[in-house]
């Protein structure tokens, strides 16, 4: 399994693909996350500002509403009839009826007022609903609104939202505003004015602005008690907790108080002293974020496919030339060095192929060098072989000289010795390999002179060479082995006197030297056989060495087309021919 | 690898990305899940403004507003119409909601419909009144035995003061023989009044007139010292009968529920105490519990939404006012 997974990463293509895919994935995810948070933050800030504004308006509405009520209350308190009724000792039933009608007119004008009531300390009671009796169970004068109004005259008391039980069996939700009723002239406390506001009016105002995300508005009074909470029962049952203490200390600004995953934005009413708070679930999510996500995912999909194709193209641009280069290298494995890699690829790969080409040419140079060195080695080997002939011949010649000296043939001794001297002088030739045909002929003649003196009547010789080729270049010690061969293999074993004829002429732009003998004869096949490499170890081998030596030297110095050849001449002659270039260009320094 | 494979992998990764995005972006939150859910609520009665069920509905609507779950209300016009409720329950099942919340009118007769809903793969949550079945995922209600005990003990206290040496006779006016609320409350009342002389239980069948007539008859024919009414209708019937006989404040009455007239009687002293439930909480919590179940959370088999003993002394306390005197519906 693990190996299979790794095999996904084995090619350049797959690696490119996975790396880019991963990068895109990470990029998209992080971009998404960041933009989500950014969007959410700015959205939240915007909503918070909006809510703050809504709260401000709400506070303003409630305050101005309350102020209107306050104005009504003040109007009622200053009313002459009211003043008169409550300041007089006796209760005037007619006046009471008038006042009642007066109070009821406010109710007709404003349906958000539930009740207006004037309560004296004793039984003096006037309400806006004359048909209703004040409840005997209510104990109005011990109720908070009554006491508060009397305790702090001049200030309007505002209650929390509550159920009013002023009239028996009628239990409306109201906010009670109460204020002390004073005698306008004496300042004496005459009673309390109660204005009950229909609480539904405030509830309507407090309806949440937004439904989604759901929010709700609740109101605290300055003691932290609830004026209103839409989920009052849940609050009182302890199912919902509001951090009332923190809310009371909260400033009126748009940075929400964030507690328990809910955010609170509040404003304080300056008139009622209420704190109006808007509550929202924190991080309620962003609407229509799905579209953003879907588009990001689509971008991802397209990007992944593009990456897939790109990975393919990209890796191809690398692997294809590499494969080409590889094929070229494989042909080098098969000893083909004469190639050049020419690849259309990126700079890096082309550099690689250029370096490969440089390397290949270096190898070629090295091979050439080795080739050359081996040639040189071969030449020096041949030189050494060539030098080997001499001691044997020298010994025989010197022996002959001794013998002739003993015989007192001074003339012959001189002849032979001078021939020997000439032989060696030309052999040495100051180290040069190439000499003139003239010198070579001189050399072979010296040799023949010596051999002729040794073998006397065994053979005769003749030299017949064109004057024109005498200055042509020639390898030294070229003819002597051929003559030696003729003597030892052609003439030595025949009963008649043999003849060696050395001829030289120009022929088709070449110089041809021939050594012909009329000895035992040699068929060209045997001759060719003697020149070949494998002809070793037999009887004729030793003199064969000399012939082969000459043959190889000719090839080495003048090229493959030059060398020895054997043919049958007139009168059963064996003719060994040497073909030389007319103008041989031999680099002497190499020898 | 071939190009086709790239395509597969790209699509797989894109799908993966999409899933990740959905989760990271907080889109697949509970809320989105709940917005798709439909719950049908089968109540005991609808269309009676300002009564118990109206407040239950308000609590449910408040919970639904918070979560976005879709609610649909149904129910017979009157509590005693069990057949209609069964019919409406079957209709609700046909609509294939994600859940049905049932306030059962009868402990036994709703059993078959609930079983049917379960077979159709619709979970049922019961509230207020139970069904004798193991199928409902939970039961959200007032612990009526506990509420009964509260009523019984309150009466016991009054009787102890009023008849320090006597053996007062107590009658119980129950609203129904088959409903679990009636059964449990009676059980609780009897437990709270243990050792007292309970002369018997009468049933008004959720009919005010029956309760009124029956009480009047019993009070005139038998020596009865105290009455317990087990729900709104029976309590009002009893209270009206006692009041009309001029025995208000003389014969102690302990009742249930918080109808406006009951409150007036409480203020006047005709009723000595009432035990009230928390219908808003009941509605709110039953939706919350249903949502928990829809989100795959484990829910308790029973949730007690509690009850309060209300007397003249505490009836205007801020914390009880809204329970006793529910807000009007805003018209806008």
Image: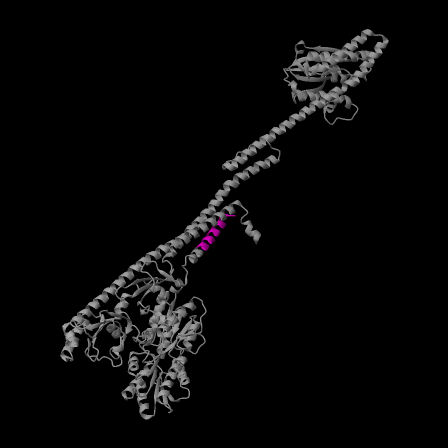
Q: Considering depth in this image, is A434 or A153 the residue closer to the camera? A: A153
Q: Position of residue B317 (x, y in %)?
A: 32, 75
Image quarter where the N terminus of chain A lies is bottom right
Is residue B310 something one can see in this rendering? yes
Dominant secondary structure (helix, strand or loop) of the stretch shown in magenta:
helix
Image quarter where the C terminus of chain A lies is top right
- Residue extending farthest to the front is A186
Q: How many marks?
A: 0
Q: Considering depth in this image, is B161 or A588 the residue closer to the camera? A: B161
In the rendered image, the vertical position of residue B61 relative to residue A475, given as above or below = below
Q: Quadrant of residue B106?
A: bottom left
Q: Residue at x 23, y 66 (%)?
A: A65
Q: Is residue A179 left or right of residue A327?
A: left
Q: Considering depth in this image, is A112 or A575 the residue closer to the camera? A: A112
Q: Position of residue A125 (x, y in %)?
A: 20, 78
In this figure, which colouring scheme has been used for the structure?
Answer: one colour
In the rendered image, the vertical position of residue A575 relative to residue B155, given as above or below = above
Q: Residue A365 in magenta?
A: no
Q: Residue at x 75, y 22 (%)?
A: A544
Q: Residue B13 in magenta?
A: yes
Q: Quadrant of residue A88?
A: bottom left
In the rendered image, the vertical position of residue A236 relative to residue A320, given as above or below = below
What residue span does the magenta drawing correspond to?
A: B1-17
Q: Quadrant of residue A87?
A: bottom left
Q: Position of residue A181 (x, y in %)?
A: 20, 73
Q: Is residue A283 left or right of residue A163?
A: right
Q: Considering depth in this image, is A64 or A526 the residue closer to the camera? A: A64
Q: Position of residue A562 (x, y in %)?
A: 66, 20
């Amino acid at each position: 399994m693990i190996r299979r997974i790794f095999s996904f990463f084995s090619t350049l293509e797959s690696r490119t693909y996975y790396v880019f895919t991963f990068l895109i994935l990470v990029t998209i995810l992080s971009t998404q996350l960041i933009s989500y948070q950014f969007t959410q933050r700015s959205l939240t800030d915007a909503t918070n500002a909006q809510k703050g504004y809504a709260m401000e308006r709400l506070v303003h509405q409630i305050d101005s509403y309350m102020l209107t009520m306050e104005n009504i209350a003040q109007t009622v308190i200053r009313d002459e009839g009211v003043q008169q009724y409550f300041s007089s000792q006796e209760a005037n039933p007619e006046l009471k009826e008038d006042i009642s009608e007066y109070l009821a007119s406010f109710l007709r004008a404003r349906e958000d007022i539930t009740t207006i009531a004037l309560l004296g300390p004793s039984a003096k009671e006037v309400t806006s609903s004359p048909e209703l009796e004040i409840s005997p169970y209510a104990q109005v004068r011990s109720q908070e609104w009554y006491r508060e109004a009397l305790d702090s005259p001049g200030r309007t008391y505002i209650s929390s939202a509550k159920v009013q039980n002023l009239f028996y069996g009628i239990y409306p939700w109201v906010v009670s505003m109460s204020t002390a009723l004073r005698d306008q002239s004496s300042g004496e406390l005459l009673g309390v004015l109660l204005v009950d506001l229909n609480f539904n009016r405030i509830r309507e105002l407090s309806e949440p602005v937004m439904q989604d995300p759901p929010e709700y508005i609740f109101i605290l009074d300055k003691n932290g008690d609830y004026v209103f909470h839409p989920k009052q029962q849940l609050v009182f049952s302890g199912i919902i907790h509001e951090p009332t203490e923190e809310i009371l200390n909260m400033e009126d600004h748009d940075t929400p108080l964030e507690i328990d995953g809910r955010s609170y934005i509040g404003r304080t009413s300056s008139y009622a002293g209420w704190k109006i708070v808007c509550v929202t679930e924190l991080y309620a999510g962003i609407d229509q974020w799905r579209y953003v996500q879907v588009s990001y995912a689509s971008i991802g999909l397209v990007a992944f496919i593009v990456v897939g194709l790109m990975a393919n193209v990209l890796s191809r641009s690398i692997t294809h030339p590499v494969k080409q280069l590889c094929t070229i290298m494989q042909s080098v494995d098969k000893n083909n060095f004469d190639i050049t890699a020419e690849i259309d690829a990126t700079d890096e790969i082309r550099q690689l192929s250029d370096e490969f080409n440089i390397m290949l040419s270096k190898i070629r140079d090295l091979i050439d060098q080795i080739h050359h060195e081996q040639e040189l080695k071969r030449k020096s080997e041949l030189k050494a072989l060539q030098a080997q002939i001499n001691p044997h011949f020298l010994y025989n010649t010197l022996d002959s000289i001794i013998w002739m000296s003993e015989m007192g043939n001074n003339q012959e001794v001189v002849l032979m010795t001078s021939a020997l001297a000439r032989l060696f002088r030309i052999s040495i030739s100051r180290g040069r390999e190439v000499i003139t045909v003239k010198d070579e002929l001189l050399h072979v003649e010296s040799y023949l002179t010596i051999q002729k003196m040794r073998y006397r009547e065994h053979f005769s010789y003749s030299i017949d060479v064109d004057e024109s080729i005498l200055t042509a270049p020639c390898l030294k010690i070229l003819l002597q082995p051929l003559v030696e061969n003729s003597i030892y293999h052609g003439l030595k074993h025949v009963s008649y006197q043999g003849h060696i004829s050395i001829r030289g002429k120009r022929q088709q732009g070449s110089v041809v030297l021939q050594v012909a003998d009329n000895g035992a004869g040699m068929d060209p096949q045997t001759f060719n056989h003697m020149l070949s490499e494998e002809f070793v170890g037999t009887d004729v081998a030793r003199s064969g060495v000399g012939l082969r030596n000459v043959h190889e030297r000719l090839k080495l110095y003048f090229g493959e087309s030059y060398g020895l050849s054997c043919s049958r001449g007139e009168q059963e002659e064996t003719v060994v021919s040497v073909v030389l270039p007319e103008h041989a260009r031999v680099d002497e320094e190499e020898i | 690898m071939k190009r086709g494979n790239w395509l597969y992998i790209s699509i797989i990764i894109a799908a993966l990305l999409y899933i990740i995005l959905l989760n990271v972006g907080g889109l697949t939150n509970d809320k989105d899940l709940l917005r798709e859910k439909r719950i049908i609520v089968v109540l005991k009665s609808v269309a009676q403004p300002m009564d118990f069920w109206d407040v239950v509905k308000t609590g449910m609507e408040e919970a639904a507003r918070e979560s976005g779950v879709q609610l649909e209300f149904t129910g017979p016009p009157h509590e005693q119409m069990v057949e209609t409720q069964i019919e409406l329950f079957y209709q609700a099942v046909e609509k294939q909601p994600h859940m049905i919340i049932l306030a059962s009118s009868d402990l036994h007769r709703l059993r078959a419909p609930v079983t049917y809903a379960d077979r159709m793969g619709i979970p049922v949550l019961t509230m207020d009144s139970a069904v004798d079945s193991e199928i409902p995922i939970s039961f959200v209600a007032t612990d009526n035995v506990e509420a009964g005990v509260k009523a019984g003990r309150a009466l016991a206290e009054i009787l102890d003061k009023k008849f320090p040496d006597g053996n007062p006779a107590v009658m119980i006016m129950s609203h129904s023989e088959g409903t679990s609320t009636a059964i449990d409350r009676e059980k609780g009342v009897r437990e709270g009044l243990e050792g007292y002389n309970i002369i018997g239980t009468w049933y008004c069948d959720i009919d005010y007139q029956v309760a009124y007539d029956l009480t009047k008859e019993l009070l005139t024919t038998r020596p009865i010292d105290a009455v317990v009414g087990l729900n709104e209708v029976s309590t009002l019937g009893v209270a009206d009968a006692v009041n009309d006989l001029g025995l208000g404040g003389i014969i102690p009455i302990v009742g249930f529920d918080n109808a406006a007239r009951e409150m007036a009687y409480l203020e006047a002293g005709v009723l000595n105490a009432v035990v009230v439930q928390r219908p808003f909480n009941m509605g709110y919590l039953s939706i919350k519990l249903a949502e928990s179940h829809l989100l795959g959370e484990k829910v308790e088999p029973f949730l007690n939404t509690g009850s309060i003993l209300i007397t003249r002394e505490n009836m205007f306390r801020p914390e009880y006012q809204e329970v006793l005197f529910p807000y009007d519906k805003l018209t806008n």
